[in-house]
Image (cartoon, grey):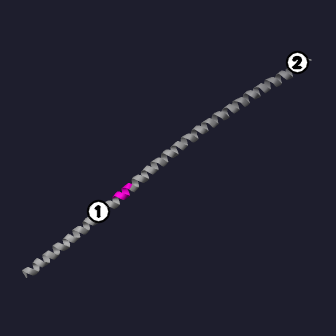
Amino acid sequence: MNLFTTKRLFKIFFLCIVAIVVFWIFKDIKRIKSEMKKQRIERKKEQNLFLENFKEMTNFYFKIQETSNIVMEEFENQRDILLQQLEEIKKIKNQENIKIN
């Protein structure tokens, strides 16, 4: 009985080819998993950067809003003061007109 018959050699050759193909498939799967992990890390970095920028923009908006409120309040105060002064001027003018008549 010959140990290396054609049929056995063909089986061994076929099993070697199958083993090589399986090895390549697992190698590709490992590479794909590694790339997916890198992409997830990159997306996470982008999300964190977006959130950081959003927080900065929100803080900037609230600072602008706060400044705007302060300016409006000061404007109203100045308007009230000017209206009071105008009333006083009108009173003085009326008193002068009464004195003249």
Which residue shows up at 14% across the image and 75% down it?
92
Q: Nearer the viewer, residue 77 or 29?
A: 77
In the rendered structure, the answer to whether residue 51 lies left or right of residue 91 reads right
Q: Residue furthest bottom?
A: 101
In the rendered structure, the answer to whether residue 72 lies left or right of residue 97 reads right
Per the image, the residue denoted by label 1 is 74
Per the image, the residue denoted by label 2 is 3
Quadrant including the N terminus: top right
Magenta extent? 63-67
Residue 96 horizontal/vertical position (percent): 10, 77
Q: Which quadrant of the figure has residue 68? A: bottom left
Q: Nearer the viewer, residue 8 or 87?
A: 87
Which residue shows up at 37% across the image and 58% down it?
65
Identity, as a three-letter code, of the amino acid under mark 1? Glu
Q: Tell me the crowding category of disc 1: few under 14, some 14 to 19, or many 20 or more residues within 10 angstroms, Cα based.
A: few
Identity, as a three-letter code, of the amino acid under mark 2? Leu
